[in-house]
Amino acid sequence: MEKIKITKMKGLMFVGIVFFLLTFGCVSLEEEPKDFPSPENFYKTEQQVISALTGSMGRLYSQWDNYSYPWGAFHTDYDATANLVFEASHNNWIWRAHYGALAILNNVIQALDEGKTEVSEAKKNELMAQAKFLRAFNYFSLVRGYGDVPIITEETDIVAGEISRQPISQVYELIISDLGVAYDYLPEEWDPALAGRPSKDAARALLAKVYLTMATAPLKDASKAQLARDMAKEVMDNGIHSLVPDVHDVFALNNKLGPEFMFSFNATPDDIATPPQIWLPWTMANGWSDFSLKKAWTDAYPDQPRKYAYMIMEDWDGTPYEDYSNAPNLRKYVYNEREDMERLQSWPNIPILRYADVLMMFAEADNMVNGGPTQAAVDAVNLIIDRANDGVANPNHPRTTTSMSQAEFDAAVIQERCYELFFEFDRWYDLIRKEILCDVWDDQPDVGPNCNEYDYLWPIPQADLRLNELMTQNPGYTTPD
Amino acid sequence: MKVKLLQLAKVPKRTSFFGLLTLCLFLIIALTTDIAAQEITVKGTITNEAGEPVPGVAILIKGTTSGTISDIDGAFVQDVSGPEAVLQVSSVGYRTQEIAVGSQTQIDVVLVEDITALGEVVVVGYGTQKRSDLTGAITSVSPKELTQLPLARADQAIQGRTSGVYVLNSDASPGGETIIRIRGLNSINGGNQPLVVLDGLQGGEPLLRTVNPQDVESIEILKDASATAIYGSRGANGVILITTKHGKMGKPVIDANVSVGIQSLARKLPVMSAAQFANYHNAMAATNTGGGNTPILPFTDAQIAEFESPSYGFGTDWQDVIYETGVLQNYNLGVSGATDKLKYNVSTNYLDHKGILKGSSYDRISLRTNLAADITDWVDFGMNYMFTKETYKSPAFRRREGISFTAQAINVAPRWAATEPVYKEDGTLNLFHNPQYGANDTWNPLASATEPEMDRPTYRNNVNLFLNFDIVKGLSLKISGGAILVNAKERDYYNLNTNEGYANNGAANLRDANSEDYQNSNILTYTNTFADKHQLTVTGGLEQLYGKWYTTNTTARNFIVDQLGYNNIGGAQFLTTASYAGERALLSYLGRVNYVYADKYLATFTYRADGSSVFGEDNKWGYFPSASVAWRISEENFLTGSSVVTELKLRGSWGKTGNQAIDPYQSLARLYSEPGDWGPDYPYNGISPTNTGFAIGGLANPNLKWETTTQTDIGLDLSLFNGRLTSTIDVYKKVTDDLLMDRELPGYIGISSIIDNIGSIENKGLEILIGGDPIVGNVRWNTSVNLTANRNKVLDLGTDERISYSASFGGYSMSNDFMILEVGQPYGTMLGWEFLGIWGTDEAEDARSYGQLPGDIHIRDVDNDGDVDLDDRVIIGNGYPDFTWGWSNLLTYKNLELSFLFMGMQGVDLFNQLRIRRESYEANDPRVLNYWTPENQDTDQPGLIDGAYRESQNLTSTVYVPGNGRGGEVSKWVEDASFIRLKVITLAYNFDRSILSKIGFNKIRVYFTGTNLWTITGYTGYDPEVANFTEQDATIGVDLSAYPPARMYTFGLDLTF
């Protein structure tokens, strides 16, 4: 009996313990982030802001992704895979990539505006100028591809409501305003260790391109031609950027940060671009030729040193391309050593802005402003033609002259842009703004019939239409039910 | 809630549940021994099937209350009234036997274990119950079934043996994961893995994989809400309870088991010989005449003559090159026993498995200690401790570990041509395929298999301690605490002979992942019987779980010295390091009431409240009730005397369970950084090193909460003829709401989605289990059949009509949505183009209207709009089976034992992705030799059409399917993967006890087992069973070249002394 009593007593004691435990369970249900920052605590230092700008570019460019493997996006006349068949999902990635980058940039701009970043006024302006340069670049890509697009800035409250597409002209207002800040506060030159960042010349060149695009389709605001010309001229007069003298060295790896390249998608040995196999024929490093040139176009390309510099006319063994392939492959982005390429390593930059482009923008705008080619315009283009011909007069590809009509010169410049800038990010937009998209396919029965006026704008992604009643589709594309 | 539990807890002294059982037993004994009307004295011994004596067996004279129980040696003596008397021999866990006394005075009884015994005690969540008292759907796998087979892993014991459980080997690599799904698929992103509870310790699949099957006493599978709701927010996917063995009263027992298995590839894919390959590829290349091309033929006439010469033979058979004979060795040693105060069971196990794929292996060392001790007469103490070290190695397959698909030996071997030598003339590995044909982006499969260096040990410590207080009679408190500590290390090096190493000039990955999970449960149990008819058990308590993990990853590239590998990452030029950490917590209050009236009417109510850290600020707590009732019709007067019906029980249950298996911090706004080529890092400054980037990882969602599954179950348990025929039938319906899903956001937001509770999924099913003993006597046959049919349907996906998954890795032209979840459709739905065959010469006009020629692939133009594009896709298959079934058998004759298990699936499709490569331009599948020609039109292989001829026809193709239908998501690659398989067959011999006792053994058993010996299937890939699971349940049914299964012959020996 005694024993049982003790048991009971102790038992009750343990009930007491349990009562304690039941009341107070000792785990906490609040979450404290462990391995990532929350947005409220970020953008405090210069480095944090730079890492966000970095992230915004990473959103656009990483191995196998987006602008690192983009060419199916641009159905240009030199591209062997172009067919101008645009499904409703065509180029949705461009929309998502740029808005993804913009979400990051808007946070940065807002943080800088609010003074959250603890840096000097000068540093703040420099950071803001970079952020706005990048924002302008993203919107410029969107407005050219899609026409009217939603404008989302640091002030937009996305949670609050649905958003509609804004007219092209308003998008350009934002772009020009952002580039104004970039123009004012970007440094003329960065320290060599930072040379990949956008400089003031990059802002000028981008402004020139924006104005030139505004002067052509769809806005056709002729008054912008003068502005485009002046901006390009500022770059030319500034003397920081210039053509690489030897056409064989334009894409050499040691020239990827200048003097000709002005702003690019960057790659480095520890952050390589998509493997070079995507460019190479099968006889070189087991190439895949994912992006290859169209036979008709390469046949028409003038026979000149530039052709051998920009195209793979023979493989490493000296075998001419005719013996292993239909058409030469692109050489621009395979300037790495053979050993690297066999190892799927390549780190070329893919230029977004380069000096040759500026020269031709100048020539095109100048021709518009003056009603015909001036000597300055002709000289600018001939710099490129001379380099393409290694400085030797070439009947296959003669210089431009002031005796050309305005239209002839304009056509020559656009054609030269194609020869010089193919497989960079220009030809598609040239075809659009010059309204010659269908013309260039005229004699190509496999693609030509697919071309129509709707191809000038890409489809708005279905998800955006489905999730926001205010969004409208571009003509010629399906809208979800 | 809390107060109620305590009030219940304070109800004073009554008998405990076990006490009640014991009391009943003693009552029987007392009553039976008291009565005396002796005419004949019968003696005997009771043994089990292994020949061991069984003490404590009740021997009752039928129709009376008199009887006795067997003693420690299994012996009994009983007086009976005469020869007409019948003895009823019964014991928990064994089938009751009736023996007519007749003229016998010596009656030796061999007890037969009763797998579905009604009297047996079943482990349930936070307690045990008599099977007859159950109101929920619980299936048990008995130790008998577990030990019959030379299983390396406990999870394999469930396969094919129980209804309602879908067990798949996700791959057949040594130590590969097993996928277990109980009653269908409830969740899309929250995971469908059942909760695994090992001796009360809650964890995941590794608990089941790493526990040594020899240590397992029983496995219970909780299926309906009545059984699982007590696990609240972790119960929605079902619960698997594993109970390990404890020492049993008597002298110490030493168990030793040894088995050795030999494995070989169960099925080889047919490939072309060198001569076939060269001829076909030349013929294919010869058609390349478009655009004025002169065809370049990959093989010269001289080469072809060489390949065709008899001395050359077949060429390189790459599957023979990468597969070899696998060996599985399993050693086990255990000691167990018990004294009055202490029960112990200590065992150790060593498993060594060299797989059939060169370079793959798994070994496991484990140690288990189970102790239980009575500290005083009202306090006992117990400890379960398990240590394991597993080392897993395998060349990459499917799409594991980011290894390029070009370097996955299993996928690539049947694609490499027989014309390719393994080694070059200089004796080094022939790393690259001749680029003139076929798979020129792939890597030598032998190099991919054997050259990577890997060391990947995982150390696990599971410990669980408890103190049990019998506070007053009927009321007990169990306080238990446990921890699961895991340290997983990976050290891999890819040298210059590997694709990864070559591309990166040497590549190393080092990973160190640690996790700690702690658990504390405080459970009060009160049990009592009122007025002889009202039996009540109340359980209540608190539980808390806390887990944290921290991981570091380092990748190193560009090594100055190739040979040093991961031991010298300082010698690498590029290093990226990342670390991750997180924690989660769960706080729970739980309660259960079991009520039984007159052994006839049963009811169970459970309730659990869970607070989870991983959910949004405004939704931290979830509540999970369940209720169930059962009626034992066989206890009603009109059936109690029945000689046919032994047990008939009707059950019904309803309840809610949850799923909180989602990563922490998902409800918070977050930024992230991620080293490597795909994250937000980018060389913004333009030069090395790359700048660290931060990007937006997610938006805040303070409302985020658990998924809720509401389940209704109706079941019937039937036992006829004293248990010779038993059956359990269940039908259920589950609806899961508030599915955790990525809610798609408009692209202009800049973040593709936010995780939210949207969507709903339904599962309905039927489960049938029939078992019995068709033959008894000298030859005994015990058999059991199970059949499961689950029907799944997506009810709602929020803003989406469809969610799609690409379900492919690169290189298959499968860039479109393929596996889809769509409202009204089930899991595993495949979307693609319908293959209608090859255009015949009589269909030339129709073909022409699509820009096609006779000999081209004919794809159905569903909307008849003149082109075949994305709008023409239809549902072309389903990867989830209509039925799964198993049929297990045990035949015994004297000392011989034959057991075998058939299992299968019906109505299941597999997308045989590898065929795309093997039958398109890579062409290494002999099927393509049957290509279309005007003379051979009855074929599904397209013709070889001359390019210049095609050009001359001036056609523009309007078939926008990759490769005009030779690639991509085309129904041609969807195959019926139904199968019937003799999964395992074992022949065993138990030596006579009489002989053994002379040499000091209790038991010697030798056996010979064959695994995967025989399969019937129409599937033409490696295997229909292993192939169909990828890492996402929604993509079930795509064969991504997983590690193929082996045929295995095992010899084993079990010793007990």
Image (cartoon, coloured by chain):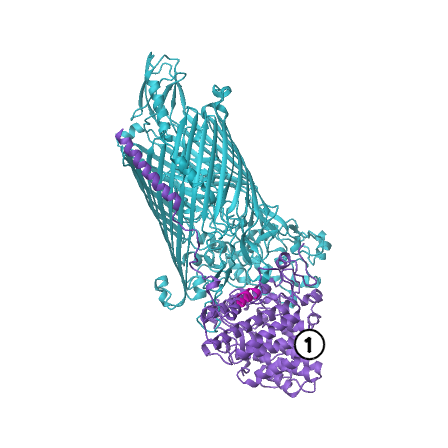
How far from the left and from the top, in percent, is residue B488? 38, 54
Which amino acid type is marked by label 1? Asp
| Residue density around tag 1, few if under 14, some if 14–19, many if 20 or more, within 10 Å | some
Residue A405 as seen in the image, left or right of residue A282? right
Towards the viewer: B982 or A185: A185
How far from the left and from the top, in percent, is residue B946? 65, 61
The relative height of residue A420 versus residue A105 in the rendered view (above or below) is below
Towards the viewer: A219 or B856: A219
- The residue at the point 71 percent across, 70 percent down is A442
Residue segment shown in magenta:
A98-106
Towards the viewer: B77 or B926: B77
How far from the left and from the top, in percent, is residue B982? 48, 38
How far from the left and from the top, in percent, is residue B769? 50, 33
Q: Name the residue under label 1.
A: A221
Towards the viewer: B735 or B728: B735
Chief secondary structure of the magenta portion: helix
Chain A is shown in which shade?
purple
Chain B is shown in which shade?
cyan
